[in-house]
Image (tube, rainbow, N blue to C red):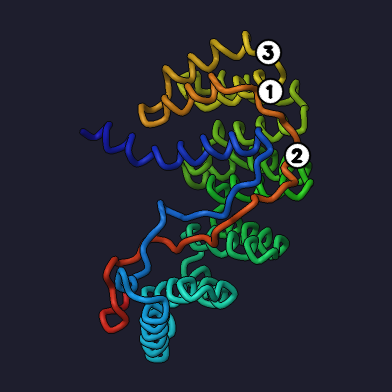
Amino acid sequence: MAEETKRNRWLPRIALIFFALVLIGAGIAPAIGPLLGGSKVPSAPTAGASPDAQKKQLEDQLRGYEAVLQREPENPNALRGVVDAKRGLNDIPGTIAPLEKLVKLNPTMTDYAVLLARTKQYLKDDEGSIQVYRDALKAKPADLQVLGELSQLLVKQDRPQAAIGLLQDTLRDAPKFNQANPGSVDTVAVSVLLGRTFANQKRYEESYRVLDAAIKEKPDNFQAYLAKALALKEQGKASEAKPLFEKATSLAPAELKDQIGLFSASPSPATKPATTKPESAKPPETPKAVEGQKPDDVKKE
């Protein structure tokens, strides 16, 4: 039971790197999507109500949350409620201020930083987004979610060397971080991100050196096998990639095995720097709050 609990705790982090390495390697700009699986707006507008009625309900909710914040300016539930209500009203720029406050109040809770950075990116403030990520890494060095998001954004901006430098610096400083806080840096996961970033730039030999070292460090970790298999396939070496896909599948959590099989069976993707933005992007969703919560129910956490 303890082992199962441990596996479930690590699965979200594994899945994060799993998808980040594929996005970086394939040169796909990440869609600005939900965090933590998304969430419903607290006390969501009544289903079937007219657009005007839904708008009024959201406006009423917003006033309620703002009233709470007048009494308790740092109430996290009210701040999240304001963000959700403004999103529902399509006031995405209006979510920046409450998100910035949430980040300030919770500097090591990187979900808020990622949400703020994604929102800035959605509003075409890439430099502001990058700064949010860098500040988050100061508060929580080597956080995998932030490293994955920031490295993808830098690659999308045609700044691959900045992404490579970020990841190399993290690996260089990993012993120091792990000495201060054992296990805080997953060097294999960071190496996988670095290897995929090299592959994105067609620097395959450097990619393979990094990934081979990661495989040697943790031969029972599927991520580096998958990353190398993807790079080989992109290079047109499908026969060499096949046994690595099989090895990755055998080691991966059950939840990811089918997806790895799809990668193995799919045509080789064209690897090029990620400069194209998604055709359509939805603003990011807030971390999950209490469903069905109304402004009058908000209390300090």
Residue 196 at x, y = what percent? 65, 32
Tell me if I can see residue 252 in this picture: yes
Residue 1 at x, y = what percent? 20, 33
Give the residue at mark 3: 237
- Judge by depth and name the residue closer to the eye, 190 or 66: 66
Tell me if I can see residue 75 in this picture: no
- Judge by depth and name the residue closer to the eye, 275 or 102: 275
Can you say whether 79 is above or below 253 in the image?
Answer: below
Task: Classify mark 3: helix, strand or loop.
Answer: loop
Rendered residue at 37%/81% (across/down): 53
Mark 2 or 3, nearer chain start? 3
- Judge by depth and name the residue closer to the eye, 71 or 43: 43
Rendered residue at 38%/60% (across/down): 39
Task: Classify mark 2: helix, strand or loop.
Answer: loop
- Where residue 271 sits, quadrant-wise, is top right
Dot 2 crowding, Cα within 10 Å, few <14, some 14–19, many 20+: many
- Judge by depth and name the residue closer to the eye, 150 or 261: 261
